[in-house]
Amino acid sequence: MSDFLSSQRSSVLTRFGAGRGVSLFFPVAVVACAAVVAAIGGLLALNRVREAEREEFVAQNTIKEESVRPELLAQISLLDRRLKGVRGLLDEHTLTSNIFRMIEADTHPQVRFLNFIFSADGLKIDMTGEAANYRALSQQIGIFERDPQIEKTEFGGLSATSEGLVGFKLSLTVKQALLHLRQ
């Protein structure tokens, strides 16, 4: 009888364990397979939607391209070339009037300039002038030295004039940007 119980016990345990292992694995496998199939289906549906949107976009662009007239494109192209040409001229054009504006703005009230020579090649201005006194001359030189458009300031040739003024010579070297429209 003990053989009978032990044989029945092992067969019950075997059936119980075997049935339990199969019953847990099978539903998990079915759920995983269903999830993969659902994901593939979702991706295929999304792909179809995106493909339809792309086709609609291409169709709209084709309609827009056909609505643009060739004459209009030629006119736009001509205008663009002309604007580039004008822009090139403006960028390369030198404006000496900017130098006169700078000198006018930077001249001390007690100083006057008598002679003006400008060399565009060296960007150099040579001037002679008169100042009411040494202090006014010193202030004038300081104004030019602080001006950001002037690279170098040199002065010399101090002399006394018959009117009691201080004569001087002044050389300024200006920056290239001062001669262009855009600064």
Image: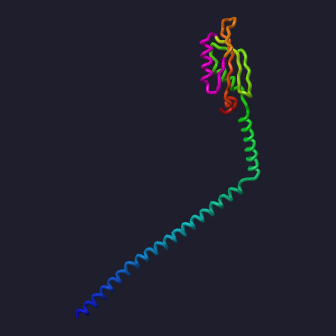
Q: How many marks?
A: 0
Residue that extends furthest to the left in the rendered view of this protein: 1
Q: Residue at 67% across / 22% down in the picture? A: 172
Q: Quadrant of residue 65?
A: bottom right
Q: Quadrant of residue 32?
A: bottom left
Place of residue 3 in the rendered image (x, y in percent of width and height, measured from the top left): 25, 93
Q: Which residues are magenta?
A: 132-155
The structure's colour scheme is: rainbow
Quarter of the rendering occupied by the N terminus = bottom left
Q: Quadrant of residue 113?
A: top right
* As drawn, 70 above or below 30: above
* As drawn, 110 above or below 14: above
Place of residue 28 in the rendered image (x, y in percent of width and height, measured from the top left): 41, 75
Closer to the camera in the image, 162 or 34: 162
Q: Residue at 73% across / 47% down in the picture? A: 76
Place of residue 15 in the rendered image (x, y in percent of width and height, measured from the top left): 33, 86
Look at the image and say whether residue 139 sits in the magenta stretch. Answer: yes
Closer to the camera in the image, 64 or 9: 9
Q: Residue at 60% across / 23% down in the picture? A: 146
Place of residue 152 in the rendered image (x, y in percent of width and height, measured from the top left): 65, 24
Closer to the camera in the image, 98 or 9: 9
Determine whether, in the image, residue 48 is placed left or right of residue 124. left
Look at the image and say whether residue 87 sits in the magenta stretch. Answer: no
Q: Residue at 65% across / 32% down in the picture? A: 183
Residue that extends furthest to the bottom in the rendered view of this protein: 1
